[in-house]
Amino acid sequence: MADADPQTAPQPGFTPVSQEELDFLGTDPIPASAYYDPDWYELERKAVFLRSWINIGHVCEVPTPGNFIHRQLEFASASLLIVKGKDGELRAFHNACTHRGTRLVREAAGHRANFRCPYHSWTFGQDGALLSAPDFEGFNTTKEQCALKQVRCEVVAGLIFVNFDPDADALRPQLGDFADEMDTVPVARATEFSEYTYELNANWKIVYDNFQENYHLRFIHPRSGLGGTGPDNPFGYPTRYRFFGDHRGQTIWYNPETQPRGPVQIGGFMAAATALAGKGLMDTPHGREYFGLFPTFFMLGNPLQNFSHVVYPLDAGRTRGVIRMYWVGEAENATELFARQAGLTMMRDLHAEDIDVIEDGQTGLSSGALEHIHFQTQEALCRHLYNTVIDKVRALQAEAQ
Amino acid sequence: MTVLLPHGFEALEGFVDQWALTGEAARAAARSAATDEARARFYEAAQPLMEPALAHLDAKPIGSLEGADAKLMRLMLSLANVYHSVEVLGDQEAENARMRSRLKFTDHAPY
């Protein structure tokens, strides 16, 4: 008999995913040094971050030819320029003039017909081609050889990913069922977003792991974690886990008895649901899914909480994070704008509550006091992330030998 | 005398200076900087007027609210900040404010 569809099946008397279903991930303790050792981070940087697809934005930021966004990616010491060309193609380039490396763009975003280096006026097209360079005859090279250095770029569900590895496999085929499911989430049709960012004193895996286990919900989010836990499921564990190669997800359990806490919260939820329903976005088929794309992207499918969260390592013990709530269309009226703000407030307050435990976890591990940390059955996604990182590092080491 | 807010919402005029601020970052900062009493006073005054205020504003194009209407919109957006302190966080507000100061808005809100 086929399993009941977890998207629509009723959830009385919650049963957590069993250890037997997750045995393939192993049960051993995890070496703590992987969460603070700079030498290990350097291996991760090369084996994971310079070879994986990293989300750096959304197509709504580059709607018309000539639109560009500029991103600094510290793990690669890279400044990237993502440009929509006249042909409608999105391309990513190193933001470095091929003459002597000067940055072409300083602003975070904008619109340009072409990109002129301020230093010696080399000028590049939206496709990266060198269009003109004063007194170019004096160089012993060709314009073709001086095009901007390109970086792989791919769009999934409206989200822009880059990869520094020219030989990397395409992202979409890696994602299994996630790819088509993500296409049904509002983010795939988003036209704008609200954003907040942070820098935390913690290793990127400590930050990311916090957001892929529910074990902490009842302790850290007792009031703001609305509907995440309940008598049938006191820890708010998911109804299933899914793994597609390096990528992983969970189907979120919601307490059906959840009641908003006050009239403004009720009004905000109702207004948000009404606005989403009016755009055909409320009854999306994958609203309970958590999509975790290796290494550092995740988002919820819930149209009321359609946020993405990306972490970017700065070094072994520091991480930058970018959280976005995506919106489809401009708010059509004051009530929708109010609802968006109410949802944004709730989400930011919820994320704020995690900050102390993330940084305190780093402090404890960085002391070297622990040889190992432990993941329980329902921290399966954390274990899968660690296992995947180990696989990547071993593959790099094997290539080097 | 300068009319600060649309007719029917005069009860909120005493809150304009502190709460009718432009941009997500400014409103979030005002919420965190306020005392519990100031947040409670604003919430208790603004919450009962939430539905009529939004109904008043919904009758106008959202992209071009000006003057008194824009101020009322900003007050409602501050209510959409402050409610979470009053309705949800309660005595956890101070700790939350300390930690959420680490989460910085990239501000491009229309109001």
Image (cartoon, coloured by chain):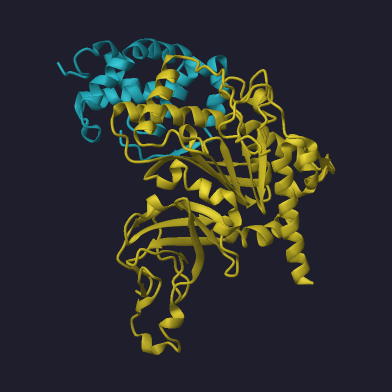
| Left or right of A114 on screen, residue B86 | right
Identity of the residue furthest to the front in this view: A1
Is residue A376 visible to the viewer in this orientation of the structure? no
Residue at image location 49% in from the left, 62% down from the top: A153
Chain B tint as drawn: cyan
Q: Position of residue A393 (x, y in %)?
A: 74, 59
Specify the quadrant that holds the N terminus of chain B.
top left
| Left or right of A69 on screen, residue A249 | right
Q: Position of residue A127 (x, y in %)?
A: 39, 70
Camera-nearest residue between A373 and A270: A270
Judging by colour alone, the chain drawn in yellow in this rendered image is A
Residue at image location 23% in from the left, 20% down from the top: B56
Q: Position of residue A99 (x, y in %)?
A: 44, 77
Is residue A42 visible to the viewer in this orientation of the structure? yes
Residue A206, compared with residue A274, is above or below; it is below
Q: Position of residue B66 (x, y in %)?
A: 20, 30
Residue at image location 71% in from the left, 28% down from the top: A15
Q: Would you identify the image quadrant in which residue A41 lies?
A: bottom right
Residue A262, compared with residue A16, is above or below; it is above
Q: How many marks?
A: 0
| Left or right of A223 on screen, residue B44 | left
Camera-nearest residue between A401 and A231: A231
Residue at image location 17% in from the left, 18% down from the top: B3
Residue B102, compared with residue A346, is above or below; it is below
Specify the quadrant that holds the C terminus of chain B.
top left
